[in-house]
């Protein structure tokens, strides 16, 4: 289950279009372990809090066993 995060500045959000699907539980666990926050909204919009960890998140997901 994704974390609930309140973001005051919507400019801190970016659509996460590279993955183009919701995270599976294994991927979420991988990001949780790395301290990376993932947001999912009821309308289905998936977004990342823009941090210096965004590149690391992309690398982790693309190298995830679920993707191979």
Image (cartoon, grey):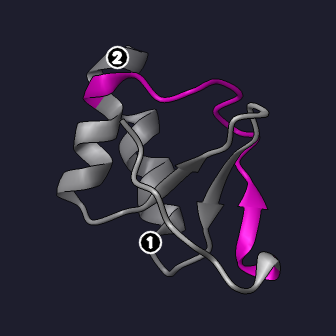
Question: In the figure, 64 relative to 15: above or below?
Answer: above
Question: In the figure, 48 relative to 49: above or below?
Answer: above
Q: Quadrant of the N terminus?
A: top left
Q: Quadrant of residue 24?
A: top left
Question: In the figure, 5 relative to 60: above or below?
Answer: below
Q: Please tell me which residue is depicted at 53% across the width and 66% down the height of the picture.
A: 54
Q: Please tell me which residue is depicted at 42% across the width and 38% down the height of the picture.
A: 61
Magenta stretch holds residue 25? yes
Q: Tell me the SS state at disc 1.
A: loop
Residue 53's disc number: 1
Q: Is residue 9 left or right of residue 62?
A: right
State the residue position of label 2.
Answer: 66
Q: Is residue 30 left or right of residue 23?
A: left
Label total for image: 2
Q: Tag 2: Cα neighbours inside 10 Å, few (<14), some, or many (≥20)?
A: few
The part of the chain drawn in magenta is 11-26
Magenta stretch holds residue 9? no
Q: Tell me the SS state at disc 2.
A: helix
Question: In the figure, 35 relative to 29: above or below?
Answer: below
Residue 21 in view here: yes
Residue in the foreground of this view, choosing between 40 and 36: 40
Q: Quadrant of residue 57?
A: bottom left
């Amino acid at each position: 289950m994704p974390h609930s995060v309140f973001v005051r500045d919507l400019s801190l959000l970016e659509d996460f279009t590279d993955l183009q699907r919701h995270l599976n539980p294994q991927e979420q666990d991988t990001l949780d372990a790395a301290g990376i926050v993932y947001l999912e909204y009821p309308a289905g919009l998936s977004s990342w809090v823009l941090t210096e960890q965004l590149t690391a998140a992309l690398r982790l997901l693309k190298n995830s066993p679920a993707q191979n």
